[in-house]
Image: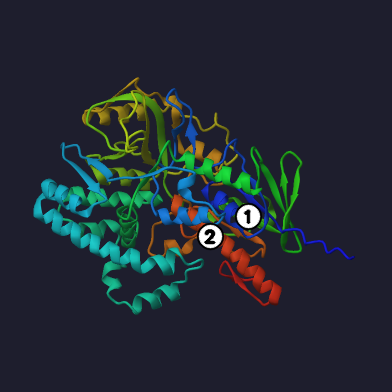
């Protein structure tokens, strides 16, 4: 009797176990690949990271989820359900906002509650302006979800055709306007301009330079905000558990020395410890600038070349600590605005740490369907410029700085709002752009990849396919952009490209266009 040996599954290696790398591993394993996931740090999660504290692990990165359907779909790929692994708590209160004049405004999942809050905050004018703005952004979000975010390779020509078939979108897009200009025309109350202008910072930009179309980011929050019970790191831990159970090999503390390219294809990954991992498919789920700058070897320097010179997005200073709060009641998601919004963005655009920034306080133990503990966990975030430091081999000592003045300024601004903490946080748990630059190779500390400034900025990001036929890109530095749900979507685009290319290759070997350049 003749025995037929089944062919071995294809070997896929993924560099980077942030949310995009984890999502790629899920989808590739579901497609039958033998998957090895490499992570240079001692835990998975990438920018979804924690620091230890007496109150338990404290998030020091993203703090909430939007676009829940993206994560439901991800877990379903391996035949399981998101709610079987983490508890998500939908927030009735999306965010609480505070101004130096003592005014406050909460936005809610229930639009009627938001309207009531707006009427008390700014009268009927504020309500009318908000409803008109919301209608505009809802149109934009609905119109551009499929052809832009859900499309693996959006093209300007296709988007132009899409807009021309729906001419009502043109005034909604305000194509010749910045977000700041649109908000000035949309809201008579300068506080509301300041509030909705903050959404540009969600992708690392300034409302003074970001295109008006970024106003649609408001709809991602308006459609629902979820808190992960215990912290965002519970989501990445759950994905790791699912991957372990499905047979994915996750290698931590794995520092990639280079990618071995032979006959125009990636054939192996070499680690600094001497390990060599052969691959049939390779996904780079880190900042694509690492490839473009030759950080992983000279043979990939032609990949995503625009990232090598493109301006970078903003970064942040992040303070994570455990304490007992004093002062105004906090929601999970709180924004404290500076008196002069423009000065902050002037500083950022000039590459300076803002002298008087607005700041975000996440009260991590609130919004969790219960009373917070006596010792609560907090994360404070302010915008900061990316390092811009071309000395990418700099050590922590080279880039150290005295963070006491910054902490003193933030503490002073909090005191103006009546907020204090005991014990008072110190500088030991501050993460700076320099530290982010060391954690994420070739990123220069930018948290969102390339700058989102300019009308076509979203079309300048690298897409999944590259000029190396079996090398693919995923992560917040690629299309469709930064943020946890968007980086997760990038993994779907990458794996769909892999499977599509394999089908095409199995039928024939036609000339293909990848990453905007012909492979012929």
Q: Are marks 1 and 2 in contact (CB under 8 Å)?
A: no
Q: State whether residue 212 is above or below residue 341.
A: below
Tell me what residue is drawn at x 47 percent, y 71 percent. 155
* Location of residue 356 by image quarter: top left
Q: Which residue is mark 1?
A: 29
Near-viewer residue (351 or 150) = 150
Disc 2 crowd rating (10 Å Cα; few below 14, some 14-19, many 20+) is many
Q: List the single residue furthest toward the right.
A: 1
For the residue pair 179 and 486, the one nearer the viewer reads as 486
Which residue position is annotated with label 2?
A: 492
Vertical order, 78 against 414 (above or below) = below
**Where does residue 299 sit, x and y in percent of width and height?**
69, 56
Q: Secondary structure at mark 2?
A: helix
Instruction: Give the structural element (helix, strand or loop) at label 1.
Output: helix
Q: Position of residue 181 (x, y in %)?
A: 25, 59
Q: Would residue 286 be seen by someone viewing this image from the given angle?
A: no
Nearer to us of marks 1 and 2 is 1
Of all residues, the one furthest to the top in this rendering is 423
* As drawn, 25 above or below 232: below
- Residue at image location 27% in from the left, 56% down from the top: 180
Horizontal side of 299 relative to 360 (left or right) equals right
Would residue 312 appear left or right of 34 to someone viewing this image? left
Give the percent coordinates (x, y) of residue 520: 67, 74
Q: Quadrant of the N terminus?
A: bottom right
- Specify whether residue 124 is in view: yes
Q: In x, y percent, where is residue 454? A: 38, 61
Marks 1 and 2, how far apart at CA: 13 Å
Total count of labels: 2
Quarter of the image holding residue 31?
A: bottom right
As drawn, is 391 to the left or to the right of 61?
right
Q: Residue at x 63, y 55 (%)?
A: 29
């Amino acid at each position: 009797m003749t025995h037929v040996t089944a062919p071995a599954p294809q070997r896929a290696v993924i560099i980077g176990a942030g949310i995009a790398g984890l999502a790629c591993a899920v989808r590739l394993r579901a497609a039958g690949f033998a998957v090895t996931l490499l992570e240079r740090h001692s835990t998975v999660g990438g920018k979804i990271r924690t620091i230890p504290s007496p109150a338990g692990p404290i998030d020091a990165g993203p703090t909430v989820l939007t676009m829940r359907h993206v994560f439901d779909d991800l877990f379903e790929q391996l035949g399981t359900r998101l709610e079987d692994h983490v508890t998500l708590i939908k927030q009735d209160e999306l965010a609480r906002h505070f101004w130096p004049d003592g005014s406050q405004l909460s936005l809610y999942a229930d639009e009627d509650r938001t309207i009531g809050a707006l009427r008390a905050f700014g009268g009927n004018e504020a309500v009318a302006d908000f409803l008109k703005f919301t209608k505009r952004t809802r149109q934009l979000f609905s119109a551009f979800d499929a052809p832009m975010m859900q499309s693996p390779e959006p093209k300007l020509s296709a988007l132009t055709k899409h807009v021309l078939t729906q001419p009502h979108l043109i005034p909604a897009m305000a194509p010749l306007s910045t977000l700041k200009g649109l908000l000035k025309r949309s809201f008579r109350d300068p506080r509301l301009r300041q509030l909705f202008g903050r959404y540009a910072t969600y992708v690392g930009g300034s409302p003074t330079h970001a295109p008006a179309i970024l106003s649609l980011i408001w709809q991602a929050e308006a459609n629902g905000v979820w808190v992960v019970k215990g912290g965002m790191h519970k989501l990445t831990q759950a994905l790791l558990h699912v991957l372990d159970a499905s047979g994915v090999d996750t290698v931590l503390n794995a520092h990639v020395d280079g990618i071995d390219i032979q006959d125009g294809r990636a054939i192996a990954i070499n680690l600094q410890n001497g390990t060599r991992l052969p691959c049939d498919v390779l996904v780079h789920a880190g900042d694509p600038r690492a490839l473009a700058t030759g950080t992983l070897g000279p043979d990939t320097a032609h990949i995503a070349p625009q990232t090598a010179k493109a301006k970078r997005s903003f970064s942040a200073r992040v303070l994570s600590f455990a304490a007992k709060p004093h002062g105004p009641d906090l929601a999970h998601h709180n924004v404290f605005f500076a008196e002069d919004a423009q000065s902050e963005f002037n500083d950022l655009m000039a590459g300076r740490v803002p002298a008087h920034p607005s700041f975000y306080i996440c009260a991590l133990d609130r919004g969790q369907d219960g009373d917070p503990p006596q010792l609560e966990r907090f994360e404070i975030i302010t915008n900061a410029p990316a390092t811009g430091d071309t000395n990418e081999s700099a050590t922590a000592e080279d880039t150290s700085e005295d963070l006491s003045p910054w902490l003193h300024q933030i503490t002073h601004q909090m005191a103006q709002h009546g907020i204090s903490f005991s014990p008072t946080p110190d500088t030991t748990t501050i993460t700076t752009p320099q530290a982010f630059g060391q954690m994420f190779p070739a990123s220069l500390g930018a948290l969102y990849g390339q700058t989102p400034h300019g009308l076509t900025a979203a079309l300048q990001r690298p897409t999944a396919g590259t000029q190396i036929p079996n090398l693919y890109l995923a992560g917040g530095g690629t299309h469709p952009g930064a943020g946890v749900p968007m980086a997760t979507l990038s993994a779907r685009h990458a794996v769909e490209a892999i499977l599509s290319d394999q089908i095409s290759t199995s039928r024939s070997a036609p000339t293909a266009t990848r990453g905007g350049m012909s492979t012929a």
